[in-house]
Each structure stands twice: as C-alpha cells, then as structure tokens.
Image (spheres, grey):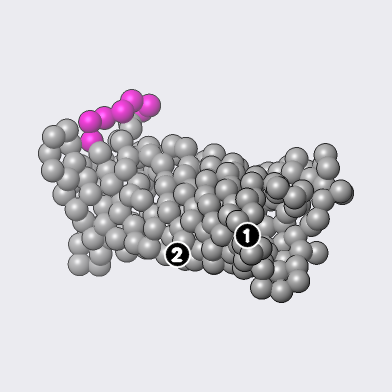
C-alpha cells in the first residue's frame, strides 16, 4: 500500500509540472493547524448486502499537517501536497432502524495520510495581501489504530486496526501576506472528504454478536491552518 501511494505521488507531481513547470516560479509550503473530523456515519453490510443497522464513530479534534511543492504562474498555482490528519475515537454508536443509537466509549485514534494535486487561484486585494481559492483531488490512506471499547467495557473484544485507501478531494480559501522577500504567511480554511470506504471489524460487537461486520461510510473534516510559502 505504501508503494501504491508513492506511485500516486510521482504521478501527481508529473501531471502538475510536466507541461509548463519549467517557466513558473517554484515554491515550497508548510501548514499546521487543527482538524475537526466529522463522524464516520456508516451502514452495516454483510455478504455484500446492506442491513438496516447504522454505526457512528465519533471523533475528537486533532492535528493536521501539510507540505507542498508548487509552481506559481501569476494568477494561478499548481502543486503536489502530502498531508496528515489525526483525531481520537471518542465513541461508537449503534442502532437498528428507528431505534435510538446506543453509544459506547472508545479508545484509540484515526489518522489520515493524503496525497493531493491542488490548484489555486490568487486574487490581489491591495497592500500585497492575496485572497486565494483552492481545490484538489487525490488519495487518502485512512488508519483506525487500536480502536477498542473502554477498559471497563471491553470483555472479550479485540482492538480494531484497519487501513483503507479511498479517493479524496478538498476545497478551501485563505489569505496570504508577505512577511519578507519571497516569503508569504498564509491562513486558510479547508474542507476535506473521502469517498465511501469499508471498515471490517475483527472483534465481536456486544450488541449484535456478529463477527467480521463491515461498515461502509466516508470521512470528512474541517481544518483551520497557518503556514508559510517560500519561493525558491
């Protein structure tokens, strides 16, 4: 899977810069911030058929990081970005049909490694301040790490460790302000989402007594980030 992500990264870099990259101003950027992960709201599936049961993993806020290499063509930019997000798994809620979900406290965390190709449109606002709009697409590796019931509720269940890859996309907007020659300070908001992917549990959920249940859903997040763009 790591080899596949590496190949995707090479492909995105080639697509972003093969046509006109040599005539553009190159830059590198880095961002750090806070991500708020939306709940992983999922439908239960067994033997390829969906059941009326629903599952809801609820996450806490966490760290987000992003680094990129890009080309600046004036009003627009193209870049290849690698990103990371994480958050704690707080609860898992399980319900059937019209039943109110029953919530269970959980431990463990979720992390997302993404490789994206982004496009930016820069709008000068005066006094060298820029407003930028961005959109990107690529792939995300989603990891559920040591997700389990709280110790006092565990019983015989095992920790959930799952890694899945899904298509991902993002949009965002922000402001950039020059702080010295060739260096821009950035502040931005980003919405990030994946397409549906499947989580297969390897432990018995005490509410249904079914082994190897599959939960199908997607991940979304909202991030507030600060960063720096340095021209090369």
Residue 51 part of the magenta segment:
yes
User: Residue 201's x, y, as percent?
Assistant: 36, 46
From this view, report whether residue 137 is shown above or below residue 69.
above
Q: Residues within 10 Å of mark 1 (few under 14, many from 20)?
A: few
Q: Nearer the viewer, residue 180 or 61?
A: 180
Distance Cα–Cα, label 1 vs label 2: 29 Å
| 102 sits to left or right of 166 | left
Q: Secondary structure at mark 1?
A: strand
**Residue at 31% from the left image edge and 28% from the top image edge:** 50
Reading the chain from its start, which is encountered first: label 1 or label 2? 2
Figure check: 229 above or below 222: below
Task: Say which residue appears at 42% left-offset and 52% top-offset.
Answer: 221
Q: Which residues are magenta?
A: 47-53
User: Which residue lies at the image location 64% right of the left edge and 54% below the top edge?
Assistant: 124
Extreme residue in the bottom direction? 180
In magenta segment, residue 156: no
Frontmost residue, 40 versus 52 = 40
Q: Is residue 135 visible?
A: yes
Residue at image mark 1? 126
Give the residue pinned by disc 2.
34
Indicate the position of residue 6 as horizontal and vertical percent values.
69, 49
Left or right: residue 226 versus residue 101 is: right
**Residue 122: percent from the left, percent from the top?**
64, 50
């Amino acid at each position: 899977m790591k080899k596949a992500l590496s190949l995707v990264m090479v492909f995105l870099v080639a697509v972003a810069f093969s046509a006109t990259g040599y005539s553009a101003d190159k830059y590198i950027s880095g961002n750090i911030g806070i991500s708020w992960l939306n709940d992983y709201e999922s439908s239960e599936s067994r033997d390829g058929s969906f059941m009326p049961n629903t599952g809801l993993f609820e996450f806490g806020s966490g760290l987000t990081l992003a680094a990129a290499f890009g080309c600046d063509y004036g009003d627009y930019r193209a870049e290849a970005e690698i990103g990371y997000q994480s958050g704690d798994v707080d609860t898992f809620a399980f319900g059937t049909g019209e039943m109110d979900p029953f919530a269970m406290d959980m431990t463990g965390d979720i992390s997302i490694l993404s490789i994206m190709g982004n496009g930016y449109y820069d709008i000068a606002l005066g006094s060298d301040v820029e407003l930028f709009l961005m959109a990107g697409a690529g792939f995300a590796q989603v990891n559920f790490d040591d997700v389990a019931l709280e110790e006092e509720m565990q019983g015989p269940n095992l920790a959930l460790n799952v890694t899945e890859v899904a298509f991902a996309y993002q949009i965002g907007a922000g402001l950039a302000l020059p702080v010295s020659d060739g260096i821009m300070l950035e502040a931005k908001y980003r919405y990030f989402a994946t397409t549906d992917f499947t989580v297969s549990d390897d432990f018995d959920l005490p509410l249904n007594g079914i082994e190897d249940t599959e939960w199908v859903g997607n991940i979304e997040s909202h991030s507030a980030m600060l960063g720096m763009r340095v021209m090369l």
